[in-house]
Each structure stands twice: as structure tokens, then as C-alpha cells.
Image (tube, rainbow, N blue to C red):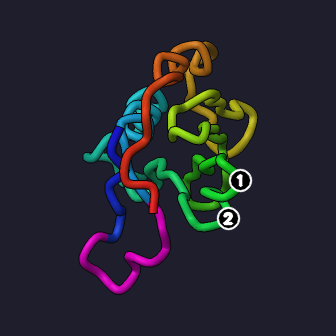
Amino acid sequence: MDLVNKYKGTKCECFNEYFCEITDELDKLANIKASDEFYSWRHYVLADDFCVKERCLAIRVPGGTVGGIWFDDNNAITKIEVDTNYVVKTYPKDINDQIQKYVGIKIENIN
């Protein structure tokens, strides 16, 4: 799974905020669409030096961290979890079950 810098080619590229398959799926599951006025509230992954060192990428929306993606020494996802009681109120009840399909997938392009 590739991480794509949210601000690629801009002066904000150093923020280490990324989109990926998981963030796209979380947007879809939360009913966040490109046509919405709140599309800037998309999910993204924070992969700064601290997160990479701790082997847990923060799953965020503007205003809060909604979950995490834990990974091993080979950058394979070992755990993924979203808090359904914080910030985003439109997740389906079984969102954590639905995103478990990403466990075992290798994360590419971690700074």
C-alpha cells in the first residue's frame, strides 16, 4: 500500500500527511464524498518521524486523531483501529471489522 503525500509539490509537503487505500476507504465508509462541502475533512495518515519510530501511524481528520495503523519491522500492518466515538459520527458500527482486511499488507514509502 503506497502512501501519497497529501501536499506533494507544495511547501507543506514536509507535514508528512498522506493519503492511501485505507484513508480512501474510511472516507467512503464515513460517507465523505468529493462533491461534499466537507471534503477537506478527508481522512489522512500522519507519518512523521515520531509515528514511524513508534511504529504507529495516526489516522486523522482535521481536528483530531481517529485511530491508528500499527506495523512491524517489515512495515507490514499488524493492527488497525478507529475510534467510532470521536469526531467522525458517520462510521458504520462495524467499521473496525471492515478495515481488518488491511492487516498483513506492507506499507510503502514511509519517510
- Mark 1, Cα crowd under 10 Å, few <14 / some 14-19 / many 20+, is few
Residue 77 lies in quadrant: top right
Q: Residue at x 63, y 35 (%)?
A: 89
Name the residue type under label 1.
Glu
Left or right: 5, with 106 as reference point: left
Q: Magenta stretch: residue 48 in it?
A: no
Residue 63: x percent and y percent?
64, 61
Q: Residue at x 61, y 20 (%)?
A: 96
Q: Disc 2 marks which residue? A: 50
Residue 14 lies in quadrant: bottom left
Residue in front for this viewpoint, 104 or 3: 104
- Mark 2, Cα crowd under 10 Å, few <14 / some 14-19 / many 20+, is few
Q: Magenta stretch: residue 9 in it?
A: yes
Tell me the distance, in whole angstroms, between the alpha carbons under discs 1 and 2.
6 Å
Does the CB distance between marks 1 and 2 fall below 8 Å?
yes
Q: Disc 1 marks which residue? A: 54
Q: Secondary structure at mark 1?
A: helix
